Every structure is written in C-alpha cells, then in structure tokens.
Amino acid sequence: MYFSLELLEAFTQAAALGSFSAAARKLGKSQSTISEAIAKLEIDLGVSLFDRQNRHPTLTEAGKKLLSYAENVFSASDQLNRMAYQLASGLEPQLTLALSDTYQAEQYTNCLRELDQNYPELEFECIVAEHDDILNLVSTGRADLGLLITQSHYAPDIAHTTIPHQVDFGLFVAKTHPLAHLTKISYEQLSQYRLIHVKTTSSTDELPLNHLFDIINPTIYWSASNYLLVLEMVVEGFGWAELPHELVKNFAKNQLTELKVSGWPYNMSIDVVWSRKRKLGMAGNWLLEKLLS
C-alpha cells in the first residue's frame, strides 16, 4: 500500500492546526481538497483519523497513534532529500578515521561536534589502532584518514603532514610496583622488570621495532595492540611502560607513579595520513583541514 506525501501532509497539518480550513490555508489549497485528501487516506488505511461530529475535527485514538508514524515519514523524507543533495555535492556516505589513543587532544571532541553539525547524515567510524596498523588501514582503504605518532618512513602511496599537537611520554608503573619506590632509576634496573609495550597486529617481527629495546634491552616483556590496553596492565602492576601523560591523566589518575629515568619525559609529534590512491570526499577534506588548523 502506497501513501503519497501529499495525503500525509494534509493529515499532519490538519492535526497540528486543529482544522481542515487552517490546513488548507497553510498549504495554499482549498478546504475541499484537504477534506478529500484526508478521506482518501482514511480509506487507504481502513481507519478514521478524525472525529467530525463537533465543529472542529479531533483526532481519534487511531489518528493519534498513526500521527507519529506520519511525522516519521516526513522526517525520513527530509533526511533522504538532504543526503541526496550532499551526495550530489560530493559528500561521501561514510568517513572512517583510524587514530592512536596517544591522541587525547580536547580539540578532537570539538572537531567531532562540528562534524556532526555540518554533516548530520554522515556515517562516521572511529578505529583505535597504532603505527603500522593505522598505515595498513589507510593504505588498503579501510580507513580514510589516520592519526599516529610521526613515523621515520612512509610508503610512497601514503600522504602525510604533521598536525599542531604533540604528545608527552613518560615511564610509569603502579604505585605498588617495586620500581615506584626508587628515587632515580638506571636502564639496568629497568631491564630487570617486565616491560609492557605496544605491538601492532600487523607486525611480523619476533621482537618489536621499539626504541626501548635499543636503549634498555629488557629480558621480559608483554605487549598489547594499543596504549590503553598497555595502561590497564600497568595499573594492575604487571610491569612498567612508556605512556602518554594525557592518557594516564584521563584514565589512570592517581593510580600510577612516573619513574625518574634519564631521557624521560620527552615529546613526539603526531601526523595525519591519507592515501594518495583515493580522493578524500567533502567531509574527509573538511576533517583534514580541521585537524591541521
């Protein structure tokens, strides 16, 4: 059964304005046209929508229940028209951002609010990953944009630029860990305890490509695919780790002790990356510009 928007519009306007004549004036039609439209809709639906015994028609119980459905049809129609216009203007139907959880900038939340306001019909997906995993997601087209710690090398098909935000790293342990009670710690002392570090799922190396292994050479280590998982293991006292200060502040405040070790804390820059093989859509270009501003 098909209901035209014209019939539904007559119904919803008459219900909202309280009379067929008011609906006719609002829609620029005759009262008889509105009456006929509502009568036809009632025949199609098989129920009476209005009680016409009084001077002004009032909604029946069936009319009250069906009114919200009619309004939903108009809402869906509006969304359809907006999405069609945006797609015709170059808006992609979906935008995927892969980002490191080292990126804890407050600007990111504000950026998402603006994205929601500017492109309310866009399907947005956020994937948390690190290093090579982010690059693989972007390279294969699984993600449109990526945010990650600046890498020393990028594949030729990966475009990249540094955003105006840096991440401060420190070495942390749980307050109950033996290292937490030492005032100054050497590399040799660190190497005697378990390191917990990030290892990407795409890594095929038996030993991770991690600068900590070049400096400290730990003999025992655990790994996880992102910094938040690493942080959770450190909170439980399983070992020490290099973690972003903002991540610790947001998710483990007052639960960890920062170690005093030569070379830490230090900061690193963040790059935004995208594929040269695929053009970014309207929303993707907008987000890229916001991240760079």
Image: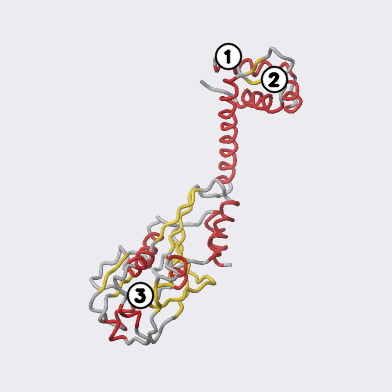
Q: x%, y% of residue 57?
A: 69, 18
Q: CA distance from mark 3 to mark 1?
A: 73 Å
Residue 274 lies, in percent from the top left, at: 46, 62
Q: Nearer the viewer, residue 283 or 148?
A: 148
Residue displayed at 32% across by 87% down = 186
Q: Secondary structure at mark 2?
A: helix
Q: Mark on residue 43?
A: 1
Tell which circle, 1 or 2, labels the residue nearer the N-terminal end. 2
Could you tell me the amino acid type at mark 1? Ile
Q: Are marks 1 and 2 in contact (CB under 8 Å)?
A: no
Mark 1–mark 2 distance (CA, rounded to whole Å)? 14 Å
Could you tell me which residue is drawn at 29 percent across and 67 percent down? 203
Q: Amino acid at mark 2?
A: Ile
Q: Is residue 270 left or right of residue 213?
A: right
Marks 1 and 3: in contact by CB < 8 Å? no
168 left or right of 11? left
The label number, if any, that marks residue 34 in the structure image? 2
Dot 3 alpha-carbon crowd within 10 angstroms: few under 14, some 14 to 19, many 20 or more: many
Say what secondary structure mark 3 lies in: strand
Residue assigned mark 3: 173
